[in-house]
Amino acid sequence: MYAEAILRGRGMRALIDNLGKVEAERFIAAIVREPFDYTEWQTGLFDGMSIRELSNLAMENYDK
């Protein structure tokens, strides 16, 4: 239970740091409101990107 509380805190901090407080809350509300299958969503996340584009994106975000 303690580990989950830490995970939730770190996740919320990541959302706020990247989206801001209002957008982080909107994101959470959208996830809670609709059924959401992360695995299914993830499968199409990079459709249409070449390996080079994907590699460049990964390198740009490596240190973030």
Image (tube, rainbow, N blue to C red):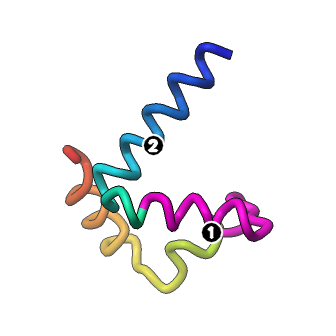
Q: Is residue 27 magenta?
A: yes
Q: Residue extending furthest bottom?
A: 48
Q: Callout 1, which amino acid?
A: Ala
Instruction: State yes or no: discs 2 and 1 in contact (Cβ < 8 Å).
Output: no
Q: Is residue 32 left or right of residue 15?
A: right
Q: Residue extending furthest top?
A: 2
Image quadrant occupied by the N terminus: top right
Q: Residue drawn 35% across and 56% down?
A: 21
| Residue with the mark numbered 1 | 30
Q: Is residue 30 magenta?
A: yes
Q: Residue drawn 65% across and 63% down?
A: 31
Q: Residue drawn 39% across and 64% down?
A: 22
User: Residue 8's x, y, as percent?
Assistant: 54, 34
Q: Residue drawn 28% across and 50% down?
A: 17
Q: Quadrant of residue 51?
A: bottom left
Figure check: 44 above or below 24: below
User: Residue 13's x, y, as percent?
Assistant: 37, 41
Q: Residue extending furthest right?
A: 35
Looking at the rendered structure, the secondary structure element under dot 2 is: helix
User: Residue 57's x, y, as percent?
Assistant: 29, 65
User: Residue 27's x, y, as percent?
Assistant: 52, 64
Q: Main secondary structure of the magenta part?
A: helix
Q: Which mark identifies residue 54?
A: none
Of label 2 and label 1, which has the lower sequence position? 2
| Residue with the mark numbered 2 | 12
Figure check: 13 above or below 49: above
Q: How dense is the environment of label 1, judged by Cα within 10 Å: few (below 14), some, or many (20 and up)? A: few
Figure check: 64 above or below 50: above
22 and 36: which is toward the camera: 22
Q: In this picture, which residue range is highlighted in magenta?
A: 24-42
Q: Distance of mark 2 from mark 1, alpha carbons?
A: 15 Å
Q: Callout 2, which amino acid?
A: Met
